[in-house]
Image: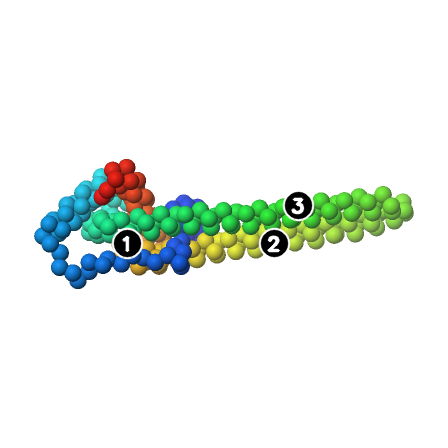
Amino acid sequence: MVQVVRCAAWRRICFKMGSERRIPMNKNIGVYEEPADIAKQQEQHYHLLSQLQSLVKDLSSTCQQRLSYDILSNLALALIDGTVFEIVQGLLEIQHLTEKNLYNQRLKLHSEHRALKQELLRKHKEALQNCKSHNIAVLRAAQQRELETLEQRVKDEQRMMDEKIVLELDQKVIDQQNTLEKAGVPGFYITTNPQELTLQMNLLELILKMQQKVSESGSC
């Protein structure tokens, strides 16, 4: 995936939805709604749209141009029943667990490498103490080659670990995009286009800010 996908900002704000979670479906689809219900939904839509438009003003002019009225209106509609907030919260929790797991994997590898080097140096020191003086030069040369071999191994394993982490995070981005697209969040689909990724990041920022506002007010 392109380097933009790998940026830390995207990884912090994008989240993976667990396969065990199911997106709640709107049970009222195709069911007749009373005028009062329609009016209430319109009121909620207008209220959410107004708040989104207010939040967008804090973004750069370029971002504001990409976040058209239609996108914000569709986003407001998607947020009405609170399902998207629940999904994003689940994604956030899983993202934190994923980052913690990857961090622990790298930390464990680093500890293993440090232990290997310490053990090798201990053996080298012991060998030098027991070595005859006329063999020290040969022994030191052999130990240097052994140390260089270990250092190369450490370097290769760290590189492979970093590549594994990058690939896993890139796959998480794809999973996240797919989940949010299926949830009906406008602007989300599988892409590596830098401009579209920026738009998706902005949309997620808006959703998180709206979630906080709704939580503080107690309702949409």
**Quadrant where the image shows the N terminus:** bottom left
Rounded to the nearest angstrom, the CA distance separating label 1 from label 3 is 46 Å
Mark 1 and mark 2: Cα distance apart in space:
39 Å
Percent across and percent down for residue 137 are 84, 47
Closer to the chain start, of discs 1 and 2, is 2
Judge from the rendering whether residue 51 lies leftward or rightward of residue 155; answer left or right. left
Q: Amino acid at mark 2?
A: Glu
Could you tell me which secondary element the residue under label 2 belongs to? helix
Q: Look at mark 1 in the image and give the residue it sits on.
A: 185
Which is nearer the eye, 20 or 80?
20
Q: Residue at x 43, y 57 (%)?
A: 171
Cβ–Cβ below 8 Å for labels 1 and 2?
no
Which of the two marks, 3 or 2, is nearer to us in this view?
Answer: 3
Q: Left of 172 or right of it: where is 162?
A: right
Label 1 vs label 2, nearer the camera: 1
| Labelled pair 3, 2 in contact (Cβ < 8 Å) | no
Q: Quadrant of residue 55?
A: top left
The quarter holding residue 175 reads bottom left
Q: In this rendering, is residue 18 above or below 123?
A: below
**Does the CB distance between marks 1 and 3 fall below 8 Å?**
no
Residue drawn at 30 percent across, 48 percent down: 85
Residue 158 placement (x, y as % from top left): 59, 51
For the image, the number of numbered tags is 3
Q: Which element carries disc 3, helix, strand or loop?
A: helix
Q: Residue furthest left?
A: 35
The tag earlier along the polypeptide, 1 or 3, is: 3
Residue 218 in percent (x, y) is at: 25, 40
| Residue in the picture at 18% in, 43% down | 47
- Residue tagged by mark 2? 157
Q: Which residue is tagged 3? A: 114
